[in-house]
Amino acid sequence: MGSRWCVLGGGMLGMTLALRLRQAGRDVTLIEAAPDLGGLAGAWEIGGVTWDKHYHVTLLSDARVRAVLTELDLDRHMVWNQTLTGFYTGAKHY
């Protein structure tokens, strides 16, 4: 009888681990406490407004994340925008 695997957490890492185990022919169960998968990459609604659970961004330099997105044919849903970083201090934006 083959071994069975359980992955706790349906965020990006948990889902990728479950995918790799399944690709290796393992029997995998993925358990997530939240009603939706995605972990901190997901969103929630507060007062009629949809908010990110956590600040997150995928950059063109994120080769491993982009490889998984390509493998799952999700990369075509990505919209790449130029981003800028700044800060506010002394009543001025920089």
Image (tube, rainbow, N blue to C red):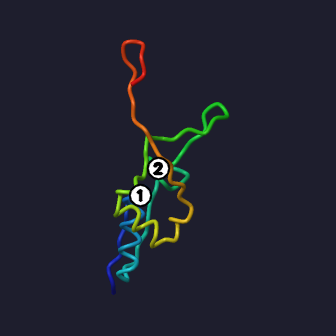
The amino acid type found where label 2 is placed reads Ala
Above or below, 77 against 5 in this view is above
Give residue 77's position: percent from left, percent from top.
56, 61
The residues tagged by marks 1 and 2 sit, at their Cα atoms, a distance apart of 8 Å
Dot 2 falls on a residue whose secondary structure is helix
Above or below, 29 against 56 in this view is below
Dot 1 falls on a residue whose secondary structure is helix
Crowd around label 2: few <14 · some 14–19 · many ≥20 (10 Å): some
**Where, quadrant-wise, is the N terminus in this rendering?**
bottom left
Q: Which residue is mark 2?
A: 41
69 or 5, which lies in front?
A: 69
**Where, quadrant-wise, is the C terminus in this rendering?**
top left
The residue positioned 46% from the left and 56% from the top of the image is 32
Q: Is residue 51 left or right of residue 2?
A: right
Give residue 46's position: percent from left, percent from top.
60, 33
Q: Which residue is mark 1?
A: 12
Give residue 67's position: percent from left, percent from top.
39, 68
Which residue is farthest right?
48
47 or 7, which lies in front?
A: 47
- Of label 1 and label 2, which has the lower sequence position? 1
The residue positioned 50% from the left and 53% from the top of the image is 80
Give residue 54's position: percent from left, percent from top.
44, 40
Above or below, 79 against 50 in this view is below
88 or 54, which lies in front?
A: 88
The amino acid type found where label 1 is placed reads Met
Crowd around label 1: few <14 · some 14–19 · many ≥20 (10 Å): some
Res. 50 image quadrant: top right
Residue 65: mark:
none
Does the CB distance between marks 1 and 2 fall below 8 Å? Answer: yes
